[in-house]
Image (cartoon, rainbow, N blue to C red):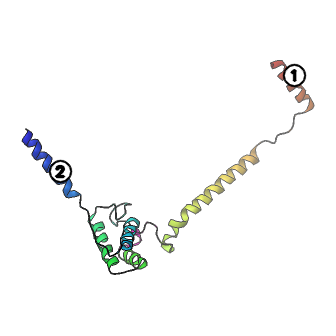
Amino acid sequence: MLRTFFILCVFCLSAVNSQALVEVYQFDSDQQRQRYQSFVDDLRCPKCQNQNLAGSDSPIASDLRRELHELLKNGMSDKEIVDFMVDRYGDYVLYSPRLQPNTWLLWFAPLALLMVGGLVIALIVRRRNASAPERTPLTKTEQDRLNALLKKAK
């Protein structure tokens, strides 16, 4: 029984350890390492739903990290790397897409919805104020009667 439990534990631990691969890349400078980290945090995995390259375990994310390392080692600028990734994988790899005609809806829809919502609220308030009955002051007789009722209630 104990032997079976031990074998089962070893099997489970080896299965867990085989899943935990850590990619280690050598960089020429600390600045190059920081640029790499910035890119893997800012670029999205093309396969994963809303996950950056640093947090994705998919094979394509691993390939992109390896490719990104090679591009940095080759001395490409940040703009060249971003352009390369967008040309190859599309705008989806950017968490903050560029402002261009096909992304206008993405950039300006929230502002337009906010303005429409403000206009609707303003119209509702205006209509409510217009339909509210006009308040007229009490006449002398009504005021005397109100005062009498208040004295009686005390």
Q: Position of residue 89 (x, y in %)?
A: 36, 73
Instruction: Please identify the residue farthest to the right as the structure is shown.
Output: 140
Please tell me which of labels 1 and 2 falls first in the chain.
2
> In the rendered structure, which amino acid carries the disc numbered 1?
Ala
Q: Nearer the viewer, residue 106 or 69?
A: 69
Q: Residue at x 23, y 61 (%)?
A: 21
Find out whether residue 95 is within the magenta segment.
yes
The answer to whether residue 119 is magenta is no
Q: Which residue is mark 1?
A: 148
Question: Residue at the location (16% across, 49% down)?
Answer: 12
Q: State the quadrant of the C terminus.
A: top right
Query: What amino acid is at disc 2?
Result: Leu
Mark number, residue 13: 2
Answer left or right for 123 relative to 77: right
Magenta part of the chain: 89-97
Q: Residue at x 82, y 40 (%)?
A: 135
